[in-house]
Image: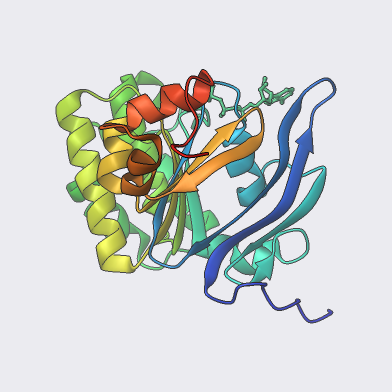
């Protein structure tokens, strides 16, 4: 097997270069480039259809890019995906689990796929941390939306991933559970030095969790910076206003 090329930026855990994805009539991702260093939580923001889920799908290897390069932990995802998949995981409300299996059975299947050692203990610990105990032996098809989201997060953490891709991790959670899940993500990053890419429509969540934000529009990256830098650049007090400025072409960066 040929040696993998050195990543352009050796400190980067996720590197995306000139990435495109076209469906028949839609240019879903239109030439994006970014990198994420270890231990960072980066928010992927943009209106409906901006290309966030497609981007996450391509990084995970679930969607094949039309062109461009993705490297994770120094491995080219087109050629060496299997060398790195066990060190990554993802959560998306759009990926459903087999309905007839119980939560415990689902987590067991995913844990076995990832080759998790002492799987029973791992599931018990996750069930305690994410308060799944009440429905661990219930069929996945019988869960409420919020319970499903918690199980999806447990599935995403089953292999203690170094790289975590989260697609709207608090969608359909009540405010209390959402706050608790955000706390869990913060602790996870701190305990594991985890690198997290998080798509979200919740600006409060992004301001709380993210070191850096990538703003997408129509498949392109239109701005990037820390939440504080974006607020300063657009002269706004909250990120929702910045989001609306960009989404509606209402106002560009100050001085631009
Ligand atoms: P949302 O905030 O609504 O979840 P998103 O930013 O995640 O949006 P994507 O799901 O990545 O957006 O979709 C980007 C574009 O690609 C949209 O126009 C969408 O309709 C299109 N698209 C996504 N998946 C497919 C597919 N399988 N076939 C055709 N078009 C697709």
At 29% from the left and 36% from the top, the residue drawn is 205
Reply above or below: 66 against 18.
above
Reply above or below: 31 against 15.
above
Place of residue 214 in the rendered image (x, y in percent of width and height, measured from the top left): 50, 44
At 54% from the left and 21% from the top, the residue drawn is 249
Place of residue 126 in the rendered image (x, y in percent of width and height, measured from the top left): 26, 51
In-front residue for pair 240/58: 240
Count how many numbered circles sit on residues in the image. Answer: 0
Q: Give left or right: position of 67 versus 59.
A: right
Snapshot quadrant of residue 169: top left
Write down which quadrant ligand 1 falls in. top right
Place of residue 93 in the rendered image (x, y in percent of width and height, measured from the top left): 45, 29
Q: Give left or right: position of 209 versus 200.
A: left
Snapshot quadrant of residue 5: bottom right
Q: Can see residue 190? A: yes
Q: How is the image coloured?
A: rainbow
- Residue found farthest to the front: 255
Place of residue 116 in the rendered image (x, y in percent of width and height, measured from the top left): 44, 63
- Residue found farthest to the bottom: 3
- Residue found farthest to the left: 176
């Amino acid at each position: 097997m040929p040696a993998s090329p050195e990543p352009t930026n050796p400190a980067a855990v996720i590197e995306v270069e000139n990435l495109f994805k076209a469906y028949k009539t839609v240019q879903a991702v239109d030439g994006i480039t970014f990198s994420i260093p270890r231990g960072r939580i980066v928010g992927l923001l943009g209106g409906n259809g901006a290309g966030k889920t497609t981007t996450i799908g391509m990084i995970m290897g679930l969607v094949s890019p039309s062109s461009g390069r993705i490297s994770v932990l120094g491995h080219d995802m087109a050629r060496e995906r299997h060398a790195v998949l066990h060190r990554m995981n993802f959560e998306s409300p759009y990926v459903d689990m087999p309905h007839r299996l119980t939560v415990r059975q689902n987590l067991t299947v995913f844990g076995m796929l990832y080759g998790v050692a002492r799987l029973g203990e791992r599931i018990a610990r996750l069930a305690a941390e994410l308060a799944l105990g009440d429905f661990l032996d219930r069929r996945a098809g019988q869960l409420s939306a919020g319970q499903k989201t918690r199980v999806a997060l447990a599935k995403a953490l089953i292999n203690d991933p170094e790289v975590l891709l989260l697609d709207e991790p608090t969608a359909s959670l009540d405010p209390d559970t959402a706050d608790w899940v955000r706390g869990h993500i913060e602790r996870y990053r701190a305990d594991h030095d985890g690198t997290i890419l998080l798509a979200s429509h919740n600006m409060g969540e992004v301001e709380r969790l993210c070191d850096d934000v990538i703003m997408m529009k129509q498949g392109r990256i239109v701005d990037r910076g820390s939440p504080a830098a974006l607020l300063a650049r657009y002269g706004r007090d909250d990120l929702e206003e910045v989001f609306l400025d960009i989404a509606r072409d209402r106002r560009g960066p100050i001085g631009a």
